[in-house]
Image (cartoon, helix red, strand yellow):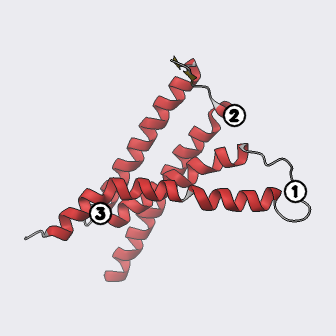
Amino acid sequence: MDKGFKYWLSWVGVLPISIIAGVLVTFPVHWVLYRTLSGGDSPFITPYPELPERILAPFFTALAIVWVASQIAPEHKFKTAVVLATLWIFGAGGGFVLGYVGNYSDNVQLNLIAGGLPIIMGVVGAAVGLYLVKKRLSEERTKTT
């Protein structure tokens, strides 16, 4: 089978485009939480608490990265989603370990925020993204048969 330029360009774009999507999804998360918690004439909470955003942003970032990677991949969509979810989970595990031991380098010390809940939410987001990809692919398969 002849695989053209578009096919290979799709494979090259999987990682950078999915990372860009993961970064871009943090903006709506911030806007929704900011408007919900501290917007309007009588804000619900003042000053704006950063903890809800720090907990929810990794969830949606991981979910977006896994989902977008599977959308961009020209074939082996589920395997691509599994690879990206696995990379995210191993990165989260490394971040958890470094935060747990309080890694110190130059003027930067890593600590766990809220007992590591943002890292856990990122892992959950990757798993939910993987589940959604699998569900979408199985639905597409049943439609074609």
Q: Quadrant of residue 25?
A: bottom right
Residue bearing mark 2: 114
Could you classify mark 2 by the number of other residues whose Cα lies within 10 Å: few (under 14), some (14-19), or many (20 or more)?
Answer: few
| Observer able to see residue 71 | yes
The amino acid beneath tag 3 is Ala
Give the residue at the far front of this rendering: 107
Residue bearing mark 3: 73
* C-alpha span from label 1 to label 3: 42 Å
Secondary structure beneath dot 3 equals: loop
- Comparing marks 2 and 1, which lies closer to the viewer? 1
The amino acid beneath tag 2 is Ala
The amino acid beneath tag 1 is Phe
Residue bearing mark 1: 44
At 44% from the left and 61% from the top, the residue drawn is 67
Q: Earlier in the sequence, mark 2 or mark 1?
A: 1
Nearer the observer, 52 or 93: 52
**Quadrant containing the N terminus in the rendered view:** bottom left
At 87% from the left and 56% from the top, the residue drawn is 44
At 51% from the left and 59% from the top, the residue drawn is 24
Pointer 2 and pointer 1: residues touching (CB < 8 Å)?
Answer: no
Instruction: Point out residue 100 in the picture as x, y percentages from the top left corner.
Output: 58, 22
Instruction: Point out residue 42 in the picture as x, y percentages from the top left corner.
Output: 92, 61
Instruction: Point out residue 17 in the picture as x, y percentages from the top left corner.
Output: 37, 59
Nearer the observer, 107 or 118: 107
Q: Does residue 102 appear to the left or right of 141 in the view shown?
A: right
Pointer 1 and pointer 3: residues touching (CB < 8 Å)?
Answer: no
Above or below, 87 against 112 in this view is below
Return the mark for residue 19: none
Secondary structure beneath dot 1 equals: loop
